[in-house]
Amino acid sequence: MRALTLDSVPSTPAVTEVETPRPEAGELLVRVAAASLNGLDAETAAGTFLEVEKHRFPLVLGKDFVGTVDALGAGVRGFQVGDAVFGVVTKPFEGAGSLAEYGTVSADYGVTHVPAGLAAADAAALGLAGTAAWDCVTAVAVRPGETLLISGASGGVGTFAVQYAAARGAKLIATARPGAESEFITSLTDADAELRLIDYTDDVAWQVREAAPKGVDTALHLAGDGLLLASLLRAGGRIASTLGLGPDNVGDQSVTAHAVVARPNRATLDRLAADVASGTIRVPVTATYPLDRAVEAFEAFTAGAMGKIVVTMV
Ligand SMILES: NC(=O)c1ccc[n+]([C@@H]2O[C@H](COP(=O)([O-])OP(=O)(O)OC[C@H]3O[C@@H](n4cnc5c(N)ncnc54)[C@H](OP(=O)(O)O)[C@@H]3O)[C@@H](O)[C@H]2O)c1
C-alpha cells in the first residue's frame, strides 16, 4: 500500500510503498478513506519524541482516520466488514499511522461508527484534535462568564477548543497572528460570543493583562510558553496543557495545572460526532490533498496552515 512515511527522524516524509498491515486479535483493518495532519505528525518528523517513544521504521505518519472496516481480527465484536468508522490510531509506538491506504486499530478504543450527518471529510479531521480540545476544556471546567485564555487557538486543537469554550459561554482571549488567522478564529464563533484576539508574535503578557487585569480564570496551553500562561492566571485559576505542563512544572500552589493526554474513547468520539452532526461545532478543514500530494500537504501544514488539513486516499 502507499503511505506517508519517514525512514528516520528528524527528516521530511515521502509517499512510499509499504506492507499492508494485518489486523491482530481484537483489531480492525480499516481501508482509510481520508486522514488529517496534526501537530503531533510534524513533531514526530522533527524527532521530538525519539527519546520518549518507540519508533518503527519505515514510520507511517498519521493519527486521525475515516474509512471502512476491511477485515476483522480474532474476537472482534461490534463491527462488521463494510462498516463506516472514524477515530484515532493509538498504538504504543510511532510508526503504524493513518496516513496510508490501510491501518489497524484496536476495536475497543479509538474507533467508532460514523453516524448519519457526519461527512467523511469532517470525520477525517475530528478525532485527535477534537478529543484533545474536549479533554482540555473539560479539565479546566470553564463556566459561563469566566475568562479562558487559549494559546495556540489557530491550530487544530485550538480551533475546536475555541468553539467548545464559546458554547459554554466563556469570555475568550485567543492567540493568533493579526490578519487571516485572527479572521479565521472569529469566523468560528457566533457574533455574540465574547472574543478578544491577541497577537502571539507581540508581548502576550502585556496584552492579556490589559484584557484581564485581575488575571484570567482559566487557560489552555496548546502552544507557546506554558509557565508564562500560568503566571497570567488569577489565584485559584486553572490551566490545561497538551504540551505536558503539569503541577510539577507550575510552582504556584494557588493555581491548578492539568497535563492533558487526549483520550479518544468511544464516548468522546461519539460526542464529537454528534456535536458536528448537530451543528454545535464545525470541523475547520481548510485544505484537502490527495495522497499523491501528501508531502505538499505536510509542507503546507508545517509552514503554518490554519485549522485542519485533510489527505484523501481514494
Ligand atoms: N497531549 C496530547 O494528547 C496531545 C493531543 C493533541 C495535540 N497535542 C499537542 O498540542 C499541540 C497543538 O496541537 P495541534 O494539532 O493543534 O497543532 P497545530 O495544528 O500545529 O497548531 C499549533 C498552533 O499554534 C500556533 N502557535 C505557534 N507558536 C505559537 C505561540 N508561541 N503562541 C501561540 N500560538 C502559537 C501555530 O500558529 P502558526 O500557524 O501561526 O504558526 C498553530 O496554529 C501540539 O504540540 C501537539 O503535539 C497533544
Image: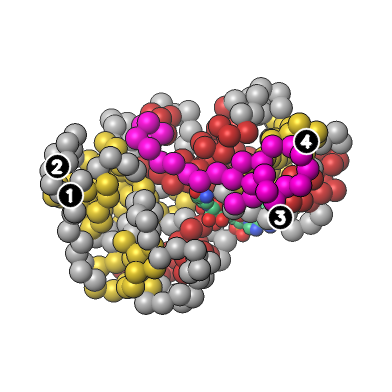
Residue 290, horizontal then vertical, whole percent? 32, 61
The type of residue carrying mark 2 is Gly
Image marks 4 and 1: residues in contact by CB distance under 8 Å: no
Q: Residues within 10 Å of mark 1 (few under 14, many from 20)?
A: few
Circle 4 packing at 10 Å, graded few (<14), some (14-19), many (20+), is few
Residue pictured at 25% horizontal, 42% vertical? 107
Q: CA distance from mark 3 to mark 4?
A: 19 Å
Which amino acid type is shown beneath numbered disc 1?
Answer: Ala
Q: Marks 2 and 1: in contact by CB < 8 Å?
A: yes
Q: Is mark 3 within 8 Å of ligand 1?
A: yes
Q: Where is mark 3, residue-wise? A: 225
The residue depicted at 65 percent of the width and 24 percent of the height is: 143
- Residue 162 location (% of width, % of height): 59, 38
Which residue position holds label 4?
254
Q: Is residue 257 magenta?
A: yes
Q: Magenta residues: mostly which secondary structure?
A: loop
Please tell me whether mark 4 sits on a helix, a strand or a loop: loop
The magenta segment is: 244-270
Instruction: Say which amino acid is labelled 3.
Output: Asp
Measured in 3D between alpha carbons, the distance from the residue under mark 3 to the one under mark 1, in whole angstroms, is 42 Å
Q: CA distance from mark 4 to mark 1?
A: 47 Å
Nearer to us of marks 3 and 4 is 4
- CA–CA distance between discs 1 and 2? 6 Å
